[in-house]
Amino acid sequence: MALAAAGQAHEPITTKLTWTQEISRIVYRRCVSCHREGGQAPMSLLTYEQARPWAKAIKEEVLERRMPPWDAVKGFGEFRDDRSLSDVEITWLAEWVEGGAPQGDEIYLPAVPSFERAGAKRPPRATKVPLTGVTRLPRDVIAVGIEPRAAVAATARRPDGTVAPLIWVRERRKHAPGAYYFREPMKLPKGAEIRVTAADSSPASLLIAAARPAR
């Protein structure tokens, strides 16, 4: 799964759905038990700043009903602690992303959920790779040594604060491909930072092999 980086700051807003009013409430109810610091997922979605870079990936995951993980077929039996999204929640998430994923007024933001410390589970670990010059990612991102069922995510944070998603391996499968290819080359300016987060695996498992100074 390759996520080509694209500018997000100037996307037109065409929806009235916002993070602070509708979307955060869905995410807090269905997602952040895993997508938080210390959770099982490789990235936190607790805040708008954390969730926004993954908006398009979130839309794809929920439309395909891969996230939140819930194997029981929807509508066939009723279960306690059902984490699956309703049709309305899926529609709202998709419409929010397609409409530019606006943040909204912070006065409407609900309280951030609090969680007890995760017992023996190992929290996601992060590593940061600062870039000392203009860097070009023209070809491939290679995932190596990721343990079975482990999750890894990588983003690039530019000096102006914008974030570009690079890759998200949601669950490493035994026979998954070892290389993922960007559709278009990407340049990152001096001072950008590549951030890799891994759950149940070493952050060094993800090697951005094509990173090299631009010529």
Image (cartoon, rainbow, N blue to C red):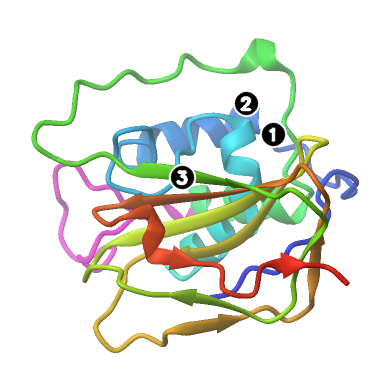
Q: How many marks?
A: 3
Q: Amino acid at mark 3?
A: Thr
Residue 87 seen in this snapshot: yes
Residue 120, quarter of the rendered image: top left
Q: Give the secondary structure at mark 3.
A: strand
Q: Which residue is mark 1?
A: 18
Judge the density around disc 3: few (<14), some (14-19), many (≥20) Cα neighbours within 10 Å. Answer: some
Q: Which residue is mark 3?
A: 127
The reply to whether discs 2 and 1 touch (Cβ–Cβ < 8 Å) is yes
Q: Is residue 207 above or below residue 127?
A: below
Sequence-wise first label, 3 or 2:
2
Q: Give the secondary structure at mark 2.
A: helix
Judge the density around disc 1: few (<14), some (14-19), many (≥20) Cα neighbours within 10 Å. Answer: many
Q: Is residue 80 above or below residue 181?
A: above
Side of 42 relative to 145 (left or right): right
Residue 100 numbered tag:
none
Q: Give the secondary structure at mark 1.
A: loop
**Picture residue at 67% right of the left edge, 10% below the top:** 107
Tell which residue pokes out farthest to the top in this image: 107
Q: Which tag is nearer the camera, tag 1 or tag 3?
A: 3
- Front residue of 84/113: it is 113
- Front residue of 192/99: it is 192
Residue 21 numbered tag:
2
On whether residue 43 falls in the magenta region, the answer is: no
Q: Position of residue 125 (x, y in %)?
A: 35, 43
Query: Magenta residues?
Result: 67-87
Sequence-wise first label, 1 or 3:
1
Q: Amino acid at mark 1?
A: Thr
Residue 169 seen in this snapshot: no
**Picture residue at 63% right of the left edge, 56% below the top:** 165
Q: Position of residue 4 (x, y in %)?
A: 70, 69
